[in-house]
Amino acid sequence: MAKSVNWLGRALGVVCATTLASIWAYGPLGAVGGSELDRHQRGYGLLLVAGIAFAVTAIAYGVMAFRDRDMAVKNAGVPDDHPLSFLTMRSTAFKDADLIIVLGTRMNYIIGNAAPPRWNASAKIVRIDIDPVEIASAPRKLDVGVVADAKIAFGQLTDAIKGKVTPANYEGWRERLRTRNVQKMAEAEQSLSNNQSPIHPLRLCKEVRDFMDRDCVLCVDGQETLNYARQAIPQYTARHRINSGAYGTMGVGMPFGLGAKAALPDSQVIVLHGDGSWGMNAMEFDTVMRHNLPVLVVISQNGGWTGDPEKSKPGRDLGYPRYDKFAECFGGHGEYVESRRTSARR
């Protein structure tokens, strides 16, 4: 009888492990997606052991299991303020990294198709994915393509680099990212703290950020609102950021919010909407009221669709209706806010 072979584990093997160990470079970067969410614990272990900076796609916010100093597994996920995550330096990191490890994400437009000018043209690319079709169809030539289960592959890689790679190898690279990240975060905080009227969307996002719990479930829906929230609101907890996804499916905010509250009744749930996306499923507010699902809804009202900057499409202009009164119609509480310090015309 033929001997049983664990092909998903064997796919990496000694050769690939040795190859990966031999191409560790000055500035490595991990590009992490949302595939195989429950299997990224080992992935974080590899990044931690090697001291590799990482960037995640929107769906992967906080996916990898976080470990404290006692190495006890937490449910919090790797937060955006983790010392290996440099939020404001993602573009720079992709342009300057000389080794990029792609895990559990498609190499599509979400990550610039892994192509210049967004990615370093001379960087070595290592991709680990359980789907061989994804490996074969990569838009950019891979230096190492590994068809493997992420948990097994990362476990083997972590073992392979022991004694060869430590965080000290990349201290210069991380310090460069860290120094500029601190500077850009300070600059961004100034923009977030502006007191102009009407309220700038970045200031609105800052207020949401400062109010939300660290384990809040945040559902973001819109065009301009979604973009500003990505810039201004970090994520700390696995599976607690939900947005329109790769296809920009508008109108999902309220449905996602009520579903999140039904699933996690003891968690804070905030839905951050643009006024255009809000109109698509606004009546779900009636649903959350009838089923006693207390969700906080914040609507960034700018009078129309910013997805049509030329204002040429019919129905683009939405005006400034009183959505706070809409909430009151169903027994909810509404506020019309025009400045940070003032809530007017309740």
Image: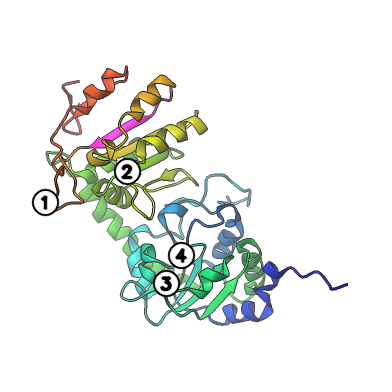
Observer-nearest residue: 11 or 64?
Answer: 11
How far separated are the C-alphas under marks 3 and 4?
Answer: 26 Å
Q: Which residue is mark 3?
A: 173
Percent across and percent down for residue 199 are 17, 39
Which mark lies nearer to you, 3 or 1? 1
Observer-nearest residue: 119 or 36?
Answer: 36
Is residue 298 covered in magenta? yes
Residue appearing at x 47%, y 54% in the figure: 60
Observer-nearest residue: 160 or 39?
Answer: 39
Residue appearing at x 15%, y 44% in the figure: 316
Q: Which residue is mark 2?
A: 221
Judged from the image, the secondary structure of the residue bearing numbered disc 4 is loop
- Tell me which segment is drawn in magenta: 293-300
Q: Which residue is mark 4?
A: 106
Which mark lies nearer to you, 2 or 3? 2
Quadrant assignment for the C terminus:
top left
Specify whether 107 is left or right of 298: right
How far separated are the C-alphas under marks 2 and 3?
Answer: 35 Å
Q: Earlier in the sequence, mark 2 or mark 3?
A: 3
How far separated are the C-alphas under marks 1 and 4?
Answer: 34 Å
Tell whether label 2 touches label 1 (CB within 8 Å): no
Q: Earlier in the sequence, mark 1 or mark 4?
A: 4
Judged from the image, the secondary structure of the residue bearing numbered disc 3 is helix
Look at the magenta stretch and give its main secondary structure.
strand
Judged from the image, the secondary structure of the residue bearing numbered disc 2 is strand
Observer-nearest residue: 42 or 259?
Answer: 259
Tell whether label 1 touches label 3 (CB within 8 Å): no
